[in-house]
Amino acid sequence: MKAHIVLAHPEPKSFNAHMAALARDTLQDRGWQVTTTDLYAMGFDPCERAAHYQDVSDAGRFDAQAEQRYASDNKTLPPEVRHELDLLDQSDLVILQYPMWWHMPPAILKGWFDRVFVYGDVYSSQRKIENGRFFGKKAMLSLTVAPSRDAYAFDGRCGEISLQLWPINFSLTYVGFSALEPQVTYGVTSGAFNARPEDHEERLQKAQDDYVRRLQNIENEAEMPFNTMSDWGEDGRIKASAPSHSPFIRHSERLDYS
């Protein structure tokens, strides 16, 4: 089995870097082959731009999707993008390790999505979800947040975390991955909301122990449910007969806020 870990944190001594190393070591101890991309260490440019392309279809106006497709067709994708795609192709499991900043992943990780999941080589109108390039592979988010688990509950003041992470997981499934339940480490800072500072080390140690236990059987975990192409009508809307797995894609126009 092979895994690829993408780390998005600027500090090599951070807890996120530690969790990435913990996943690497745990899987390698089980006999897995593991590769890692440290986005900050490699100086990954998260901004898609014309300068990344040596040969362009239109020198007068940069259209990101058009140039990605042109580079895909002509085998001229930027070398760092080709390298990442090669690593993803070789992997059975992909882990994205990052801190939650302003309820979103760091910009460098969003840019990794923008630049690596290229139109053409990775997805197209027909090549997505169960027809996606990475179908048959699993992907998992592993992230840290400062507040407590209660703050990210369905009635928590930070908002339900499963909803906040849905767009990222959907992006992974859009290119074919089967998304696993996220690994969320709560209360990473010693001053976390609703957490006692004296419990900090114990809390983080438990999070590490839980992660190691999970990784011992990660290849057998069932994926999160997402709709497939057969669930959509020709109008692009979910069929009445299809299941709804998220408030983001639902059968009723009305949301119940009562």
Image (spheres, rainbow, N blue to C red):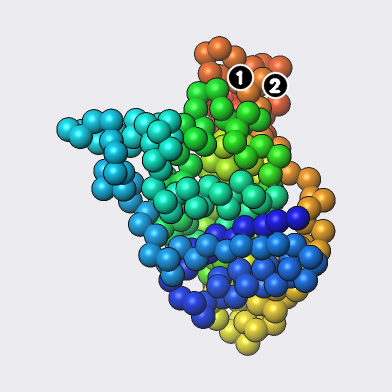
Image coordinates of residue 89 in percent, x first then y, are 61, 46
Residue assigned mark 2: 242
- Eyeballing the image, is 200 above or below 130? below
Residue type at mark 1? Trp
Name the one closer to the observer, 198 or 213. Answer: 213
Residue type at mark 2? Ala
* Residue 172 visible in rendering: yes
Image coordinates of residue 13 in percent, x first then y, are 51, 80
Find numbered disc 1 in the image and state the secondary structure of the residue it sits on.
loop
Instruction: Report the residue at 63% width, 87% height from top.
Output: 198
* Residue 113 visible in rendering: no
Tell me, for residue 232, which label it has, or none. 1
Tell me, for residue 105, which label it has, or none. none
The C terminus: image quadrant: top right
Q: Earlier in the sequence, mark 1 or mark 2?
A: 1
The N terminus: image quadrant: bottom right
Please tell me how crowded label 2 is: few (under 14), some (14-19), or many (20+) other residues with Cα within 10 Å.
Answer: some
Name the one closer to the observer, 104 or 41. Answer: 41
- Eyeballing the image, is 238 above or below 214? above
CA gap, disc 1 to disc 2?
8 Å
Q: Is residue 160 left or right of residue 22?
A: left
Name the one closer to the observer, 54 or 186. Answer: 54
Find numbered disc 2 in the image and state the secondary structure of the residue it sits on.
loop
Name the one closer to the observer, 135 or 35. Answer: 35
| Residue 23: quarter of image | bottom right
